[in-house]
């Protein structure tokens, strides 16, 4: 497998899984957050044409792991995707993942703004099960159901760990 998409709620472990698979297979990771947001924070969205151009360039590469909550961006990779992974974790797991990660204020231009954005992110992530767009559980389920290639859906960290163990062995 050399072209993988990982979707799931904020805090579900997408970045951890992508980083782990990247280490196993020496495949670069494409973080959809970095494509969607302007550098320096999570409060200014890039222009749509800039996002589209970046994704078009990235998905032409021979290998990548694209990961993120943005279902509409993930779908742009699906035509060339060999494996789709859906991290369908419950809210306590996602909340814990977000709390462990923290506000990422050291990576943002303003620590005050970072804390404010983190509060908004927690609220937004908690609403994952009631939203209906492609950045929601129902949207991710829709993407997962319609994907005809190799796909996996994990609902616990134990399942992810077992999957990674199997990948390391193969």
Image: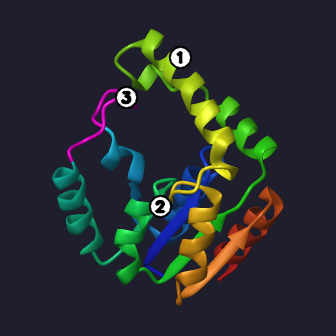
Q: Nearer the viewer, residue 142 or 111?
A: 142
Q: CA distance from mark 3 to mark 2?
A: 18 Å
What label does residue 43 carry, if any? 3
Q: Earlier in the sequence, mark 3 or mark 2?
A: 3
Relative to 68, 80 lies left or right: left
Identify the residue under disc 1. 115
Write the residue at 33% across / 39% down.
37
- Percent x, y of residue 45: 30, 38
Q: Which residues are magenta?
A: 38-47
Relative to 72, 49 lies left or right: left
- Percent x, y of residue 125: 62, 40
Q: CA distance from mark 1 to mark 3?
A: 12 Å
Q: Tell me, yes or no, if residue 103 can be seen here.
A: no
- Percent x, y of residue 91: 76, 45
Q: Tell me, yes or no, if residue 71 can be seen here.
A: yes
Front of the two marks 1 and 3: 3
- Percent x, y of residue 63: 36, 74
Per the image, label 3 sits on a secondary structure element best described as loop
Image quadrant where one finds the C terminus: bottom right
């Amino acid at each position: 497998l050399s072209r993988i998409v990982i979707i799931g709620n904020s805090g579900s472990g997408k970045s951890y899984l992508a980083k782990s698979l990247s280490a196993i297979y020496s495949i670069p990771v494409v973080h959809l957050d970095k494509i969607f947001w302007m550098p320096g924070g999570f409060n200014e969205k890039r222009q749509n044409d800039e996002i589209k151009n970046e994704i078009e360039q990235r998905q032409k590469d021979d290998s990548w792991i694209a990961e993120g909550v943005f279902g509409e961006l993930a779908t742009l990779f699906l035509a060339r995707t060999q494996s789709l992974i859906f991290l369908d974790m419950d809210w306590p797991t996602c909340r814990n993942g977000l709390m462990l990660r923290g506000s990422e204020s050291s990576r943002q231009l303003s620590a005050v703004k970072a804390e404010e954005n983190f509060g908004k992110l927690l609220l937004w992530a908690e609403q994952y099960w009631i939203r209906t767009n492609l950045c929601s559980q129902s949207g991710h389920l829709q993407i997962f159901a319609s994907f005809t290639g190799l796909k996996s859906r994990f609902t616990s960290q134990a399942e992810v760990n077992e999957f990674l163990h199997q990948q390391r062995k193969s």
